[in-house]
Image: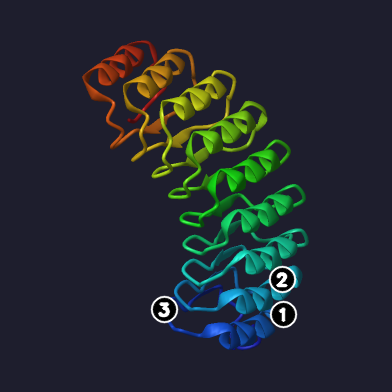
Amino acid sequence: MVDNTSDETFITLDLAGNEIGPLGAQHLADALRHNTTLTTLNLQYNEIGDKGAQHLADALRNSTTLSTLNLSWNQIGALGAQHLADALCHSTTLTRLDISYNPIRALGAQHLADALRHNTTLTTLDLQINQIGSLGAQDLADALENNMTLTTLDLQLNQIGDVGAEHLANALRNNTTLTALHLSYNEIGGKGAQHLADALQNNTTLTTLNLSSNQIREIGAQHLADVLRHNTTLTTLDLQHNEIGEKGAQQLADALRNNTDNKAF
């Protein structure tokens, strides 16, 4: 049990890989309702499912201290994502939520996007390998138009494609808080890279863009090179494994001669 009466300095609990299941999650959730010290809870690899997510979401609504929650690899689907999203509408302390490697799909992303329209504390959301597709990316992008707190969004390996990249690019034109966007392994081609590059012409907050292991090739590299000549905020651009070729490399090299702010490729 997480009991604040026994240790007033107990702030981190790591139970990763313990097969606690939904019942174990319920016991922890019951304890969290009374605890006033725990700030970090790691429950990855625990098979808690949608039911376990519901129990933790119920506790999250009333928690006054929990700021980091890791629920990755837990067989959480769209229903579990909905419970967590509902809790985020009420939570005033959670800043980091990791639900990566869960099959929440587009519907789950929609629920979380709805929460982002109301939540004012979450700064980091990790949705790697959640099968959200371009539809899920669209819902999240729409939410980013108005969200003023999220700084890091991880959407690696979600099959968002060029269409999803376009939606996110549209959000980047207006969003003023997001500093890191991770889009590796998303089947993004030259067209998607062009949309993102166009958005970076106006964006003044994004510092990290990860497009590794996509298919932007030479044409995508050219679009990004064009924007690097003018963008003054991006410091890290990851283009590993994109088949940009010799000409793409030349375009980026030429851009670097004019851009002194970009610190890493």
Mark 3, Cα crowd under 10 Å, few <14 / some 14-19 / many 20+, is some
Against 11, is 242 above or below? above
Residue drawn at x 69%, y 56% is 111
In the displayed orientation, state which residue is furthest to the left. Answer: 246
Determine whether, in the image, residue 25 is placed left or right of residue 120: left
Q: What residue sits right under mark 2 in the picture? A: 63
Can residue 179 be seen in this snapshot? no
Q: Are marks 1 and 2 in contact (CB under 8 Å)?
A: yes
Tell me the kind of residue under disc 2. Ser
- The image quarter containing residue 3 is bottom right
Percent across and percent down for residue 11 are: 56, 73
**First-in-chain label (3 vs 1):** 3
- Which numbered disc, 3 or 1, marks the residue closer to the eye? 3
Which element carries disc 2, helix, strand or loop?
loop
Percent across and percent down for residue 80 are: 64, 69
Determine whether, in the image, residue 132 is placed left or right of residue 110: left
Tell me the kind of residue under disc 1. Arg
Q: CA distance from mark 3 to mark 1?
A: 23 Å
Task: Point out the image quarter for the N terminus.
Answer: bottom right
Q: Are marks 3 and 2 in contact (CB under 8 Å)?
A: no
- Residue nearest the viewer, comparing 152 with 247: 247
Q: What residue sits right under mark 1 in the picture? A: 33
Q: What residue sits right under mark 3 in the picture? A: 17
Can residue 160 be seen in this snapshot? yes
Tell me the kind of residue under disc 3. Gly
Which color scheme did the rendering employ for the protein?
rainbow
Q: How many marks?
A: 3
Task: Point out the image quarter for the C terminus.
Answer: top left
Mark 2, Cα crowd under 10 Å, few <14 / some 14-19 / many 20+, is many
Q: CA distance from mark 1 to mark 2?
A: 6 Å
Residue drawn at x 48%, y 13% is 230
Percent across and percent down for residue 244 are: 28, 26
